[in-house]
Amino acid sequence: MDDKTYNPFITAQKQFDHAAELLELDQGTRDFLRYPMREYQFSIPVRMDDGTVKVFRGFRVLHNDARGPGKGGIRFHPQETADTVRALSMWMTWKCAVVDIPLGGAKGGIICDPHNLSLLEQEHLCRGWVRQLAKTIGPLSDIPAPDVMTNSQHMLWMLDEYETIRGAKYPGFITGKPVEMGGSLGRKEATGYGVMITVREAMKELGINIQDTTASFQGFGNVSQHAIELYQQMGGTPTCVSSWNQEEQTAYSFRKKDGFNPKELLSVTDHFGEIDKKKVQDLGFEVLPGDAWLEQEVDLLVPAALENQITGDSANKISKKTKIIAEGANGPTTLDADKIIKEKEILVIPDFLANAGGVTCSYFEQVQSNANYYWAKEEALGKLDLKMTNAFVDVSKFAKTNKLFMRDAAYMISVDRVAKACKARGWV
Ligand code: NAD
């Protein structure tokens, strides 16, 4: 499904162009928002465990900070490209704006595969990334966070390097820290739970009883695991999930038609979110091809792996039963696929709305870190629920009033907020 020629930045720009057209934005604002404001690309030399030096490529892109400091994760991935980071930074701008938090959009990455790196090598890589950027990122300018294949330990190494360089404590420099080291309770769950809060609201609007529904998920990492957990708590039945098989370099889907327990599945999953293909069969799962998760006869589909996963070809295979697609991943759906999904009249909860729970709780973490006062988990998750519900209701109302696709409605609200902030500052 993964087309090597696919360029997520072109998709992000086309989505933006469409919103700019709908909003009738002036040319100066369009030109400004189509590209990131700042970009850094650099080399990170790392002394490997065998004594050799390996040089990695690092990125940090700040798309827009008119509404507040840049915010966005750092991804470790062997196929990372400058354009992927640009696209993700742009989507972060719209994401922060749609949930109305005072942050801009940024993203970072390193081309690497942590599967093949020792913990010490990963620590060197994290510290090297911060050394290249210490003058430009910070709690008041640009705040990193975890993303694909990075976790709280990576964030802590990065924080430690930053504080060592700066000679003081800056817990608000980075989010996604371990809870005992300044992280926020609820951050781990926030993205997946946020996805399901929007699904809950969508089902309410469509008059669907969540307890009568089934769902299929792509990916079984941070986002998907917690989305499945809350979905099941709310009474839904998850029946299928896919994950990447590192050894075979391909994906598989795993199905239990009567529903599965995510806790049981976790017992055969590694910390990269890879489900063990052999052990999972002992738990009664069928093993299916990687794309099968999308073709299931379910009410809800949740792509929660990577971008470019629902394409013009595969969208045709979505079952007639499917009523909602909640995009847990960033950019999982191509422009061609969007057209087909519109024709099928499936409600799409667009990525930068559906998965905004992560950055919302990251914002809460930053608030707590800067104040050096930490909230109970219920408080963080309660505030998350309120933010996500309000954002969903606003977008849905706007879509209905103006007869728009949810993605267009979300784009119009976000782009308008950012464009107004740029104008108010006198930038455009
Ligand atoms: P993760 O690294 O924890 O998990 C990724 C999962 O996807 C793993 O289970 C992996 O096996 C699976 N996967 C990878 N390629 C696949 C493929 N081709 N087919 C099937 N499965 C595949 O990542 P995550 O943090 O859960 O992030 C997932 C997506 O959500 C990404 O697009 C990320 O940018 C986005 N996102 C994450 C957060 C967050 O807080 N973690 C916030 C917002 C958006």
Image: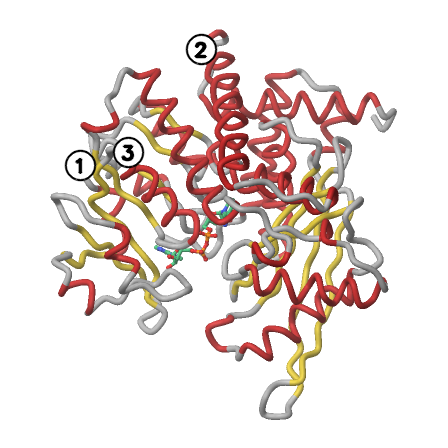
Q: Which secondary structure lies at badge 2?
A: helix
> In the rendering, at what x and y percent does residue 178 appear?
57, 58
Q: Give the residue type at disc 1.
A: Glu
Specify the farthest residue to the bottom.
51
What residue does disc 2 label? 400
What residue does disc 1 label? 297
* Apparent side of residue 229 relative to residue 187 in the rendered image (left or right): left
Q: Quadrant of residue 150?
A: bottom right
Q: Is the CB atom of the residue marked by disc 1 within 8 angstroms of ligand 1's nearest atom? A: no
Q: Quadrant of residue 43?
A: bottom right
CB within 8 Å, label 2 to label 3? no
What residue does disc 3 label? 300
Q: Which secondary structure lies at badge 1?
A: loop
Q: Residue at x 36, y 52 (%)?
A: 219
Label 1 to label 3: alpha-carbon separation: 9 Å
Q: Residue at x 54, y 30 (%)?
A: 383
